[in-house]
Image (spheres, rainbow, N blue to C red):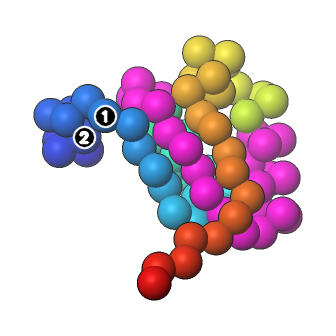
Amino acid sequence: MDYLMKTGGNVLELGCGTGRVSLTLASAGFSVTGLDLSDTMLEIFDNKLLKIDDEVSNKITLVKGIITLN
């Protein structure tokens, strides 16, 4: 978290799952993009976003997909 505080940049969480880490980072003030392949996990995460403060949920963008490296 200290490194993130120094950079002040955006965060990409690969395999964000149900949002445990992403929610913590967004609550700390970071903009987070969460990437996951599982519809089920992203649905659980999205339902969590509906139940929290807009100030935090608006800092999170969810993306379904996979990253491939060549």
Give the residue number, with chain letter if any, for mark 2: 4
User: Which amino acid is tagged 1?
Assistant: Gly
Mark toward the viewer: 1 or 2: 1
Q: Position of residue 41 (x, y in %)?
A: 76, 62
The residue under the point 63% across, 23% down is 58
Determine whether label 1 and label 2 are within 8 Å by CB.
yes
| SS at circle 2 | helix
Q: Position of residue 63 (x, y in %)?
A: 69, 51
Task: Tell me the quadrant of the picture where the N terminus can be found.
Answer: top left
Q: Position of residue 29 (x, y in %)?
A: 41, 24
Residue sitting at the far front: 70
In this rendering, would 51 be left or right of 62? right
User: Which amino acid is tagged 2?
Assistant: Leu
Residue sitting at the far bottom: 70
| SS at circle 1 | loop
Give the residue number, with chain letter if any, for mark 1: 9
Magenta segment range? 27-48
